[in-house]
Amino acid sequence: MISIDFLYTIIGTPLGYVMWPIYLLLQNFGWAILIFTIIVKLAMLPLQIKQQKNMAFSQLFAPKVKEIQQKYRNNREKQAEEMQKLQAQGYNPAGGCGPLVLTMVILFGVIDVVYKPMTHMEHLSSSDISNVITVAKETEYTKIFLNEYNKQDKEIIDKYLSGDQNIIYVTTENGQLTHEYKDNEEYKTKYEEKDPSADQLTIEQINKYGSLFVTSDDAYTQFTGDNSRLTAETKSRISAIAGKYKGMQKELLALQVYEQYPDVFKSCNESVLSNDVKGRLASLSSNMMFCGLNFGSTPKLAFEPLIIIPIFAFILSLVQTVLSQYYSKKNNPEMANAGGAGMKVMLYIMPLFSLWISFSVPAGVGFYWGINYALGIVQTIVLQKLYSPEKLRAEAEQKMKERKLKDRQVTTTAVVTDAESGEEKTVTKTETLSQKEINRRKLAAARKADAEKYGEEYHEEDDD
């Protein structure tokens, strides 16, 4: 079964190559997303124009659609049958879904690009990215034992690294330590006190503590298993770090660790991280900032600068929804309520979806989503001016007339003999039939089919 990460990669890879030269030119992730969104909107403009024309053509069927919905409101099967007949005549109720589907597909691609800036923007090799992620994981593991949890766990780790391989296990000899003294105030003071000197990590500390969990699966199992003497919160934190680096966001997580401890990465041996990789990490970290906002961070529901991104996306989405509703009622009042209350609810779900997604993904994705709506608002207003409903309706009516005329045209081919030369030649004739003649010919064709079916002789003059 294809994983969701694989689908993101399939869509994100070509989009990454579109955004990459923009990023190289401007050296900023935010500007790259902005220019990319404008390019996408311009590329989709012919599709949007075609959609608007198709909608104008479909609107000519509005009275008939309304009549069918009312006449067969209690007979869904008959209603569907009549609607299919309208579709055969050119009515397309889903004609406006194409741009929306394409927009959603591009959104998935942008998510992949934002989550993987080392891959798409800096084009680091897979081995270099793997090394960066490993250093980040080791750094996070080290933080646990030096400045995040109680010193008892660090003492256990130190004894383990000194050769006491049994210190990690709960045994009859040492198993009473936590249980016997867990409520003792002196014990709490001794082991729960944070170490302020450990705020700055060194590469030596990373190699001592962090590498223990990356290079040895057996050690990881020992430290997080049921028989481990480490506290539950420490074991939980170790497992959480291991888990979060298995998702598609691992490049962003590693970049965030780099931003917190750049000296650790700069101190790494060249066999682990080359000077070129270190320089590109520094450049990428700087280029992820746009107008003081880190586009690699995910906004939180709190009073912080990044919250402006979800608000920005929500408001613009709401404005475009209201604007689309306004023009829809103005241009086609017959179909304004065709979808009922359910359709109106669906329309206003999009702004809420924009708000939700902007709090669920890095700010770069929310920024793209908001800019996409901003350009959509401009596009809606411009197209309304350039392709007025009156003009489109006139074109649609002409198209309808031409379609009906074409349906009444019949082309026949016959072999005739020239009266003078006696030569045979093929003559093709196109004629426009009246509706009465069309019906007569259909009836004749049906009778001929019945005659052939039952072995009877058919005479065309019987239908005249």
Image (spheres, rainbow, N blue to C red):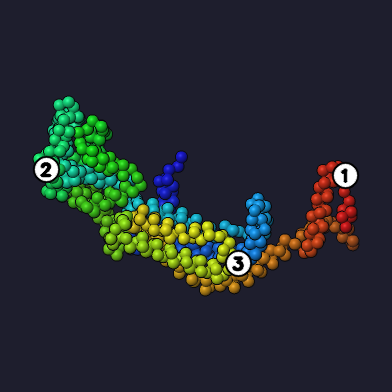
Q: Residue at x 82, y 43 (%)?
A: 453
Image quarter hosting the C terminus: bottom right
Secondary structure type for disc 2: helix
Task: Give whichever of 172, 418 is nearer the camera.
Answer: 172
Q: Is residue 289 visible?
A: no
Q: Is residue 208 above or below residue 316?
A: above
Within 10 Å of disc 2 (Cα), the crowding (few <14, some 14-19, many 20+) is few
Secondary structure type for disc 1: loop
Q: Are marks 2 and 1 in contact (CB under 8 Å)?
A: no
Give the left or right position of residue 405, taking residue 22 as reference. Answer: right
Q: Amino acid at mark 1?
A: Glu
Residue 233, located in which quarter of the rendered image? Answer: top left
Residue that badge 1 annotates: 456
Q: Amino acid at mark 2?
A: Thr
Name, please, the residue furthest toward the top. 172
> Gap in Å between the C-alphas at discs 2 and 1?
107 Å
Residue that badge 2 annotates: 189
Mark nearer the N terminus (3 vs 2): 2
Q: Is residue 239 visible?
A: yes
Expressed as whole percent of the image width and height from the top left, the position of residue 17 reads 40, 55
Residue 152, located in which quarter of the rendered image? Answer: top left
**Of the two numbered discs 3 and 1 in the rendering, the one whose residue sits closer to the viewer:** 3
Q: Are marks 3 and 2 in contact (CB under 8 Å)?
A: no
**Of the two numbered discs 2 and 1 in the rendering, the one whose residue sits closer to the viewer:** 2
Expressed as whole percent of the image width and height from the top left, the position of residue 418 reads 87, 60
Mark nearer the N terminus (3 vs 1): 3
Q: Residue at x 39, y 53 (%)?
A: 111
